[in-house]
Image (spheres, helix red, strand yellow):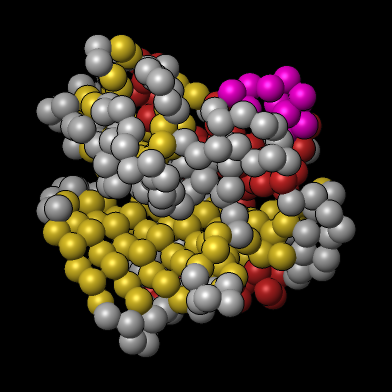
Amino acid sequence: MNYLLLAPFAFALLSATIATAGTSAHDYKVLPAITKSNLSLFPIVGGAELNTAAFLTLDEGLRSGQVVITETGTTTTPLVRPSPHYPLPNPSGQVNRLALLNNSDRPLLLLAGEVVTGGKQDRVIGVDGIVPPKSEPVDRLASREFAAAAPAASAALAGTSSYATVMQNPEVEKRVAFVAADYDGLLRELRKVGAKGVVVAINGQITWADVFASTSLLEKYWQKLIRSYAAESLTNAGSSGDVDQKQAQAFLDLLQGTREVTETEPGVFRRTEISGDGYKVFTLSSLLPKAEYTVHMAKMSYEQTASRNVRPLLRRP
């Protein structure tokens, strides 16, 4: 893995950040929001529609048996759970070792925030990544690259240390499903307009944006995404403020930053994290032959504490 760190200074990134086959950040347009209670979703349209059919998702791989995740010989099972979409710290510094094997003929796409279970501790995929086809066993589910131990659940949901257990709580699951169900029909509308992502606002505050290289890839992740947005809206329940389309567009357009960290696995992927004033931008670009484009971009709002430490506002479990 090659690492490139740019010391803090202002630089213009903009179109280079999510450039996809000639598409720049300014090619994306935010549509009016669909709002229910304290959760608002602004569809993102525009840009080139890329062929992402070659990529295998974690759920697809686990269901078919082509992807195996093991811990001391025990195979894990897939979980579709709302979860964080940003690198999570491992509070203990140690987790039981897991290995991932991609036996398929397709590159495996791992999306930050996906949850896998096995052994003594749930795991949350820490950052986006790509695993080449027919890979050797990869010990990435115990490293900073792809995973961290699942953190303790929010007290607003339940008092247990297992993230998956919390989300299996019938009352919590009922509440999340109820909120997410309000947006099931939105997927049909997103498909009609060729949307590739959404800007998310909770209580009138823009907190997140997800953009994919194709509408079909957004569809594959929609259930996980909408459930994560729904869970976040529940843990931040309160009076709703006002946020408009113009503000959502401005949030999506602003991709400049003061610090950039890039990690590259030659010939496979490039992952970039950009820190700006009150936000971070994460991009995953494929470097695979015939698929050299940005697969996923996420932007997260932050607030600055008095000590200048960055505290995440979104994706808390």
Left or right: 42, with 129 as reference point: right
The quadrant of the rendering that contains the C terminus is top right
> Is residue 50 something that shows in the picture?
no
Q: Looking at this view, is 62 or 258 the one in front?
A: 258
Left or right: 84, with 205 as reference point: left
Q: Position of residue 294 (x, y in %)?
A: 34, 57
120 inside magenta stretch: no
Which residue is drawn at the image coordinates 19% and 68% (left, top)? 4
Q: Is residue 242 above or below residue 211?
A: below
Q: Position of residue 277 (x, y in %)?
A: 51, 79
Which residue is drawn at the image coordinates 41% and 49% (left, top)? 89
Residue 170 sits in which quadrant? top right
Left or right: 11, with 138 as reference point: right
Q: Position of residue 293 (x, y in %)?
A: 29, 57
Picture mark count? 0
Q: Residue furthest right?
A: 239
Which residue is drawn at the image coordinates 69% and 59% (left, top)? 201
The secondary structure making up most of the magenta span is helix
Which residue is drawn at the image coordinates 18% and 62% (left, top)? 3
Q: Is residue 135 above or below residue 72?
A: below
Q: Looking at this view, is 298 or 219 the one in front?
A: 298
Q: Residue furthest bottom?
A: 10
> Is residue 117 something that shows in the picture?
yes
Q: Position of residue 202 (x, y in %)?
A: 73, 57
Q: In the rendered structure, which segment of residues is drawn in magenta?
A: 165-177
166 inside magenta stretch: yes
